Image (spheres, rainbow, N blue to C red):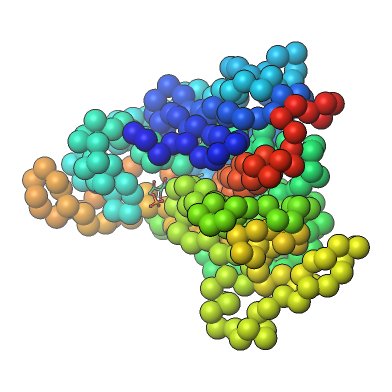
Amino acid sequence: MSGNILGKRFVVVSFGESHGRCVGVVVDGCPAGLKLSEEDIQPLLDLRRPGQSIVTTQRREEDRVEILSGVFNGYTTGAPIAMLIWNKDIISKDYDKVLETPRPGHADYVARLKYGGYNDHRGGGRFSGRITAGYVMAGAVALKLLRETLNVEVLAYTKRIAGIEAKPLPAETVRERRWSNEVRCPDQEAAEAMKRAILEARASGDSVGGVVECIALNVPPALGEPVFDSLDSDLSKALFSIPAVKGVEFGAGFKAAELRGSEHNDPLGINGGNVRPLTNNAGGIVGGLSTGREIVVKVAFKPAASISKPQHTLNIKKGVMEEVVVTGRHDPCVVPRAVPVVEAVVGIVLADHALRAGLIHPVLRGA
Ligand SMILES: Cc1cc2nc3c(=O)[nH]c(=O)nc-3n(C[C@H](O)[C@H](O)[C@H](O)COP(=O)(O)O)c2cc1C
């Protein structure tokens, strides 16, 4: 199975399956001399952990990260950093059925076709949202590296769930309040309505989708490479590697298609002594390079496929349509748990490009 490696200089190798022994990641290319321990990684991982509230799956996992290599005397050594969590709360028999009646909207059937049935189908295997725990571990390292060396800050939060939208809020409020409720929305009133919508969907055996917005502050200008490794290409690729992502847009995004040039163009001016766009319809990226303005990206998540409402699908052994009820423990909305994943993934790509641009030295002193 190839396709599990992301990045050129900050390289992330993802491994593990939902119901296998563990889920983890190897980070190659992290500079030596970054102070790093499990305590730097666990908080972000805890925000992704299943079973933490009534709006998420009830699978109970401790998800304690273990750093296996690449750290010595409390600092990164420059060697690959291997990290993992163990899978413990596994009920695999719930997934026997997907071998005959693949879940509509999930990867069961196409995965079977691709790997000739040798893939681990339990809990969705490699196609499970659980593999994003590895992204979060790598992202926590990347985010610390960016913070300590370039003062870059990445803030993701829930923008919309089930059509309920958070009002626009300044970055300080997002920073302060985004983790203050189960849905990870800094607008408290919207958060309560979102929570009700998730619980109502769950009660009716259904699921809902939504949008995560991510803002990256203090990103140096001119990060990115022409042409296939443009910053927006690399961010999009990484964000689309999060299961259930169906759309990614920067700045004005799809609305740009309805604007005139005179409305969409961001005029250049002087801001804080630097040449910067004075507006940010571009979302902080022009020509694939960062502009020095905040990067603003929205990520659309579909409603989780595994719903307990009866659905019709093909029984691939018998060749007949059947009514199925998906069992197992599932997220009625993946958005709240995806917020730290989006933050992590954006961190990984920015760290990769900052290293490629030579803005982070391969040996850090005192970071
Ligand atoms: C944090 C997280 C949790 C997820 N939990 C579930 C879940 O409980 N049930 C489900 O059907 N899909 C869940 N997904 C999404 C599926 O893994 C995904 O929809 C599936 O692999 C098909 O891929 P696609 O939607 O990207 O096409 C989750 C995704 C993430 C990021």
Count of residue discs:
0
Instruction: Return the x and y of residue 264 as percentages of the image width and height.
Output: 65, 79
**Relative side of 168 to 50, left or right:** right
The image quadrant where one finds the N terminus is top left
In this view, the residue farthest toward the right is: 273
Is residue 273 visible in the rendered image? The answer is: yes
Identified at 49% across, 47% down, the residue is: 242
Q: Is residue 37 visible?
A: no
Residue 162 at x, y = what percent? 52, 64
Which quadrant of the structure image shows residue 4? top left
Horizontal relation, residue 150 to residue 284: left or right: right
Q: Quadrant of residue 349?
A: top right
Counting from the top left corner in percent of width and height, residue 279 is at: 75, 73
Q: Is residue 198 left or right of residue 172?
A: left
Give me the residue at 79% from left, 38% from top.
149
Most foreground residue, 330 or 124: 124
Please provide percent x and percent y for residue 192.
65, 60
**Image quadrant occupied by the C terminus:** top right
Residue ID at (64%, 45%): 353
115 is higher (above) or lower (below) than 208: above
Q: Residue at x 28, y 32 (%)?
A: 119
Taking 52 as reference, is 79 above or below it?
A: above
Q: Nearer the viewer, residue 85 or 141?
A: 141
